[in-house]
Image (cartoon, rainbow, N blue to C red):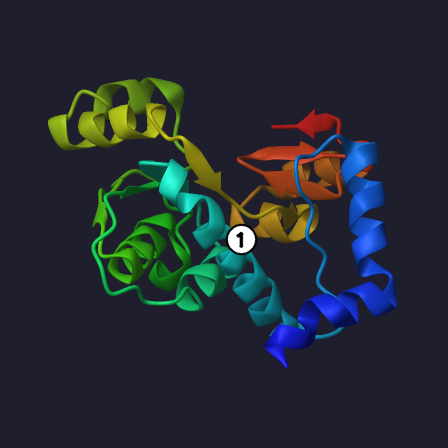
């Protein structure tokens, strides 16, 4: 059935839609899965598998791979195939923790991917929502500094784009912040930045 996936996509017109979106958005490659995660949460696994397949097609070109946290990224790591040979890559958590379940934090996901690739990984023991002056102090700790230096060298980044209201709750945003985010028409979030339907940053 997996071998038939490209044929099914062709029949459903998904391949044509991918081509149209690729040209309209100016993105190198777009892959669409014939499922709705809103209607079928289990379809997240389908997306993870497709993403994993594409990841293996390009990973050899890269040495330092960044990964964020969240349920989608956890599914991505969980569904990656285990390889037999060692891969000379280092997996780096691209964000700090959000104070949520440890399973879906970037540190844990980085370790999961590293084990699947028989590669290396580093950890970032810093909360994501942290004041800049405190971050400057913490960044002087050698273990934190070495990870931050690795983040600067990331040449492949894997991340999820979250629903704005869901991410505001996960980030423990105040009621006032949530109200601002909603009033400004935010629909999605990535790296602490909230975007409206036109892709414009409306809050960070």
Relative placement, left or right, of 119 versus 201 is left
Residue at left 18%, top 20%? 140
Above or below — where is 157 with respect to 87? above
Callout 1 crowding tier (Cα within 10 Å): few <14, some 14–19, many ≥20:
few
The answer to whether residue 13 is seen in the rendering is yes
Instruction: State the residue lying farthest toward the bottom.
Output: 1
The answer to which quarter of the image holds residue 91 is: top left
What element does badge 1 sit on? helix
Q: Is residue 142 above or below residue 186?
A: above
The residue under the point 39% across, 37% down is 61
Residue occupying the far left of the picture: 142
On the image, the x and y values in percent for residue 9 come to 77, 66
Q: Quadrant of residue 111?
A: bottom left
Q: Residue at x 22, y 59 (%)?
A: 85
Count of picture labels: 1
The residue pinned by badge 1 equals 54
Determine which quarter of the picture holds residue 190: top right
**Camera sees residue 36:** no
Image quadrant where one finds the C terminus:
top right
The one of 59 and 169 positioned closer to us in this rendering: 59
- Which quarter of the rendering shows the N terminus? bottom right
Residue 8 in the image: x percent, y percent? 77, 72
Q: Position of residue 96 (x, y in %)?
A: 36, 40
Using the image as rendered, state which of residue 58 and residue 40 is in the foreground.
58
Q: Position of residue 95 (x, y in %)?
A: 40, 38
Tell me the residue at 20%/25% (across/down).
145
Q: Is residue 96 above or below residue 3?
A: above
Q: Is residue 30 left or right of residue 84?
A: right
């Amino acid at each position: 059935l997996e071998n038939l996936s490209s044929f099914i996509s062709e029949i459903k017109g998904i391949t044509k839609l991918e081509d149209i979106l690729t040209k309209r958005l100016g993105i190198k490659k777009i892959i669409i899965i014939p499922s709705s995660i809103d209607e079928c949460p289990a379809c997240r696994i389908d997306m993870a598998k497709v993403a994993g397949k594409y990841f293996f097609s390009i990973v050899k070109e890269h040495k330092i791979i960044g990964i964020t946290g969240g349920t989608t990224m956890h599914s991505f790591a969980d569904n990656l195939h285990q390889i037999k040979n060692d891969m000379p890559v280092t997996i780096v958590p691209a964000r700090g923790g959000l104070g949520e379940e440890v399973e879906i934090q970037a540190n844990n996901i980085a370790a999961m991917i590293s084990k699947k690739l028989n590669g290396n990984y580093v950890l970032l023991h810093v909360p994501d929502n942290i004041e800049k002056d405190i971050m400057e102090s913490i960044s002087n700790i050698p273990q934190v500094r070495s990870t931050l230096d690795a983040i600067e060298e990331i040449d492949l980044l894997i991340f999820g784009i979250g629903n704005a209201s869901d991410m505001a709750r996960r980030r423990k945003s105040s009621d006032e912040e949530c109200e601002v985010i909603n009033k400004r028409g935010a629909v999605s979030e990535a790296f602490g930045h909230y975007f409206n339907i036109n892709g414009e940053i409306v809050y960070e």
